[in-house]
Structures are given as C-alpha cells and as structure tokens.
Amino acid sequence: LSRPEQSDPGLARDRTALAWTRSALNMAGSGALIARAGFAANLDVLGVVAALTMAAVAALTWRHGWTLYRGRARADAPPGQQTGALGLLTTATLAIAIVAIVFSTAV
Amino acid sequence: MRVMSEDPADTEPGPTWRRWLASLTGREGARERELDQTGTPPDPRFTLANERTFLAWNRTALALIAAGLAAAQFLKFNVRGLRLIIAIPLIVLGAVLALASYLHWEDTERAMRLRRPLRYSWMTRVLTGGIALIALVGAILAVVDRLAH
C-alpha cells in the first residue's frame, strides 16, 4: 500500500487487493467451521481434508491478490480479466457447499 | 494462467454456463482468450470494481454456507430434522449465488469491453427474498416446535 493517491485515483488497486485479502480470510475462517462441522458429523477425515483444501485455497487467494497488486502497478498495462482465479474461487465455493450439505445431513 | 492455442475451434461460443463448464474441463485458456479478445479493454478502474464486486458476492455466498453449517450444528429443535429446513436452504442459496456471481462478473466484463449497458442481476432480489423467507420459516418452525411439545 505504498502508492500515493495521485497515481491511482480512488485507490482502486489498493481496494481490490484488500478485497482479495478479505476473501482469503473468509475462506480460512470457513475452513475452520468446516473442520468443526466434520467432527460434529463424525466424518473427521473428510472434515480435515476439506479444511486443509480450504486453507490452501485461502493461501493462494491471499498470494494471488498481492501478486496482482504488484503487477497492476504498471500504469501502461490493463489490469486483465481474472477469469481463471475467479473461476477457481467459484468452483471451491460450490465444492464447500456440497461438503456442507453432507455434514449438515450427517450431524 | 493463459494457455495460448492456435486452434480457432477452441473458442467456445454460446451461453455463459457453457463457457463456465469449459473452464472446469480444462479449456479455460481458450475461454479467457475469448474474453480478452472481445471488444477493447475498459477503464482499468471498471475492471477492478467488477472484480471487487464479484469477491464481495463470493464472500456473501460463503457466509450463507457457513450460516447453514452453523444452523445444522447449533439449532436445537425437539424434532431433530427441523434444523435441516433452515440449514439446507441457506447452503443452497449460497451455492446459487456463488455460481450466479461468477456468471454476472463475466457478463459485466463482456458488456464493458463492448461498451454496452450493464445488465442488472436478479441476485439482489434472490438474496433479499431468500433471507426473508428463511427467517420467516425459522420463526414459524420455532413456534410450532414449541407448541407441539
């Protein structure tokens, strides 16, 4: 967060990087919840695997956000569409929903 | 991540859901190039704002799923199965919004690249209606469960 406001009006780049960070934290927090739900449902292994996967997705999301932030510092380059990263995030969320339904019905 | 292929047949036309499916089956490179090659890049701030909006929707979806998980674990009804009437709709609502927000992000990005007007999404209505309905059902269930025992 080092660029002055003059070179990035509205600090769009900074706010986007912080949004990625929030998403990563959200994913990590939900991972802890998933693990707890897994134990409650006596599906320990599935719970731990899901939580570890989500921790990995959270770490990737965090890193990706700040990698983008640095890459987008070049004013001449368009920011580019994050089709792959956003698709991965969507796929992960759908997978979490499926695991959540399994745990909810098994509690 | 971009895989450049020279095969023009890689470009997947058709509805957004089909392109999304293509991304799941490893044809993501072609699809990304397609969005990249549509129209001209918009103001970078618009791309960033669209990205933040998607991320906010995705967090909302995750929060709904987490709420459903919590409902399944912590709600105590006398009839045990009743908690699923709250939990499952919350999780399904989260899943629907997660998918819809991706499709909406891509639709918006495409519209901006083609300098077309942005389309409104039904997601806000579904989110509001869904939460209101689940809350109402939860209140009714709580009363009925109490009266029946």
Image (cartoon, coloured by chain):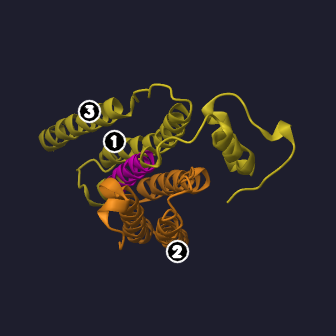
The reply to whether discs 3 and 2 touch (Cβ–Cβ < 8 Å) is no
Total number of numbered discs in the rendering: 3
Q: Residue A57: give x, y in percent of width and height.
A: 52, 67
Q: Nearer the viewer, residue B116 or A101?
A: B116
Chain letter of the residue beneath label 2 in the structure image: A
In this view, the residue in front, A48 or B129, is B129
Q: Are marks 3 and 1 on the same chain?
A: yes
**According to the image, label 3 marks what residue?**
B133
Q: Which residue is mark 2?
A: A52
Q: Is residue A38 above or below residue B16?
A: below
Label 1 environment density (alpha carbons within 10 Å; few <14, some 14–19, many ≥20): some
Q: Residue at x 55, y 73 (%)?
A: A45
What is the x, y in percent for residue A80?
Answer: 57, 52
* Picture residue at 72% right of the left edge, 30% below the top: B13
Chain for colour yellow: B
User: Which type of secondary structure does the marked residue at label 2 adopt?
Assistant: helix
Residue in the image at 50% along x and 72% along y: A63
* Residue B25 at least partly seen: no
- x and y, in percent, of residue A26 in the image: 37, 64
Q: Colour of chain A?
A: orange
Q: How far is disc 3 from disc 1 in space, using C-alphas?
A: 11 Å
Which residue extends farthest right?
A: B7
Magenta residues, dominant SS class: helix
Q: Element under label 1?
A: helix
Q: Which mark is residue B85?
A: 1
Identify residue type, mark 3. Leu
